[in-house]
């Protein structure tokens, strides 16, 4: 009896102690801000960096109000950017409705060679500017890095390095309209669809023929067929002279690449996907293709590998809109 | 104390009851079941979408699975899926793409029953939908 009482009391004591310890608060102290010019940066875009697309950053600078104000912000890219690169001269805040509202804090940005600059013209001591780097053709397959820097009126400068980021070797072309009987001849090398006349002139670079057939006995529908495929997959098609390439294809479904589909899916096709692609044992035709379907292809001369995605199809006009990512071997 | 002894006794009894169940080469349980048949069959294309035009016809007497595939199906790169009777297994195992393009010599798969005593070989007969 004595024994169990002892256990009971010690347990109670322990519980009480635990409660007390749990209640102990740490006094909050307002952190003392650093009294120098500070900066920070994040990259806002995801996925592969493709030539012609932008890489977006948000660069923040701040200095204590009593010490001075912001004077200028610079971004230096290791590779000269393509036209259209700019640094925002507005600092944004998010209002109650969740909308980003920009307030102009400086002159519009000036890009000279690698360096983009915004000069502040408002008395501001904190700002976050966005930077949009348009990837130039020269950067393909290379790495690019950035140095963001800020200047304040008391003569201080800070800088923040971002990168290096690898620029994909692949090319991309979006929203190519193809139509049965007209713009039906697709060239991967040119990333373009031609009509029969132009196709005859470029016979050596025609890789696929687009056609739509509404058959009652089978599901043919939208198709991408190599000119050299078995004629049963090219019903009613008379190929222009010289169009005779054989392109291996593998159908894919549920592969809505973010860049091509421009939909909500967070799937990205990048260089490694093309490097590992092996379609040597695949057929040279793909029929019964639907919206949001795609095909992996490799050209007959083994120069290009590509992923062709169907953004939309139209059975009435016998046409489709496709987008393409292409990798040069 | 009494309770403790009883508890230990029960534990010992339970442990003693544990048997070494028989398993086969694949580490699968060998059971008393004798059922040995294919109950369903599915065939997926390279895009993991079915290529069958209608439900498969499975003849458990003739031991055949008859299917019709869509016109334009690439017969070299297909993923078959078998549904078998409880505890059965399939030989050869399906580990990836299968080439069904030789229509004259249909692929054969053997179903082995749960007790591993009965085995039946099924032929997969493919016809291609006409255009």
Image (tube, coloured by chain):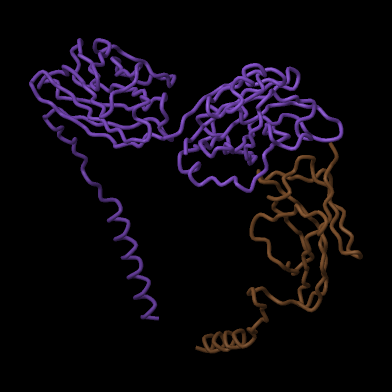
Quarter occupied by residue A142 = top left
The residue sitting at 65% across, 40% down in the picture is: A251
The residue sitting at 54% across, 35% down in the picture is: A306
Task: Point out residue A9 in the picture as x, y percentages from the top left corner.
Answer: 34, 70
Residue most extreme to the right = B61
Task: Point out residue B38 in the picture as x, y percentages from the top left corner.
Answer: 81, 62
Against A191, is B102 above or below?
Answer: below
Quarter occupied by residue A49 = top left
The residue sitting at 66% across, 81% down in the picture is: B21
The residue sitting at 18% across, 24% down in the picture is: A150
Task: Tell me the shade of chain A.
Answer: purple
Depth check: give the residue in front, B59 or A137.
A137
**Which chain appears brown?**
B
Quarter occupied by residue A207 = top right
Task: Point out residue B14 in the picture as x, y percentages from the top left corner.
Answer: 61, 84
Q: Left or right? Give the position of A255 relative to A5.
A: right
């Amino acid at each position: 009896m004595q024994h169990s009482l002892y256990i009971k009391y010690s347990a109670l004591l322990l519980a009480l102690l635990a409660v007390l310890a749990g209640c102990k608060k740490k006094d909050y102290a307002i952190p003392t801000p650093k009294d120098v010019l500070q900066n920070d940066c994040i990259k806002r875009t995801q996925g592969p960096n493709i030539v012609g697309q932008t890489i977006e950053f948000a660069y923040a600078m701040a200095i204590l109000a009593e010490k001075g104000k912001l004077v200028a912000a610079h971004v230096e890219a290791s590779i000269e950017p393509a036209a259209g690169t700019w640094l925002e001269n507005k600092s944004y805040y998010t209002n109650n409705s969740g909308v980003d509202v920009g307030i102009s804090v400086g002159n519009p940005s000036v890009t000279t060679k690698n360096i983009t600059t915004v000069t502040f013209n408002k008395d501001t001591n904190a700002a976050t500017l966005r930077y949009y780097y348009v990837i130039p053709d020269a950067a393909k397959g290379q790495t690019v890095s950035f140095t963001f820097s800020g200047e304040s009126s008391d003569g201080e400068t800070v800088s923040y390095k971002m990168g290096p980021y690898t620029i994909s070797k692949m090319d991309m072309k979006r929203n190519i309209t193809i139509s049965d009987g007209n713009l039906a001849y697709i060239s991967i090398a040119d990333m373009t669809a031609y009509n029969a006349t132009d196709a005859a002139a470029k016979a050596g670079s025609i890789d696929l023929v687009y056609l739509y057939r509404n058959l009652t006995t089978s599901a043919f529908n939208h198709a991408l067929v190599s000119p050299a495929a078995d004629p049963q997959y090219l019903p009613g098609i008379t190929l222009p002279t010289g169009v005779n390439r054989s392109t291996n294809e593998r159908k894919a479904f549920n592969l809505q690449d973010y860049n091509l589909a421009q939909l909500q899916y967070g799937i990205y096709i990048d260089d490694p996907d093309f490097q590992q692609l092996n379609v040597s044992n695949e057929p040279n035709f793909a029929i019964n293709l639907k919206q949001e379907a795609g095909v992996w292809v490799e050209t007959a001369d083994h120069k290009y590998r590509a992923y062709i995605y169907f953004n939309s199809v139209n059975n009435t006009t016998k046409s489709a809109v496709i987008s393409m990512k292409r990798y040069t071997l | 104390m009494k309770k403790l002894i009883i508890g230990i006794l029960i534990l010992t009894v339970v442990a003693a009851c544990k048997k070494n169940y028989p398993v086969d080469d694949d580490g699968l349980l060998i059971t008393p079941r004798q059922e040995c048949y294919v109950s369903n069959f599915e065939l997926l294309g390279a895009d993991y979408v079915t290529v069958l035009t209608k439900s498969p016809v499975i003849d458990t007497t003739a031991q055949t699975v008859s299917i019709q595939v869509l016109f334009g199906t690439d017969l070299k790169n297909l993923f078959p899926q078998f549904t078998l009777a409880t505890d059965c297994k399939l030989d050869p195992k399906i580990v990836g793409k299968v080439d069904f393009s030789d229509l004259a010599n249909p692929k054969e798969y053997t179903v082995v029953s749960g007790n591993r005593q009965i085995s039946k070989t099924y032929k997969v007969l493919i016809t291609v939908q006409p255009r």
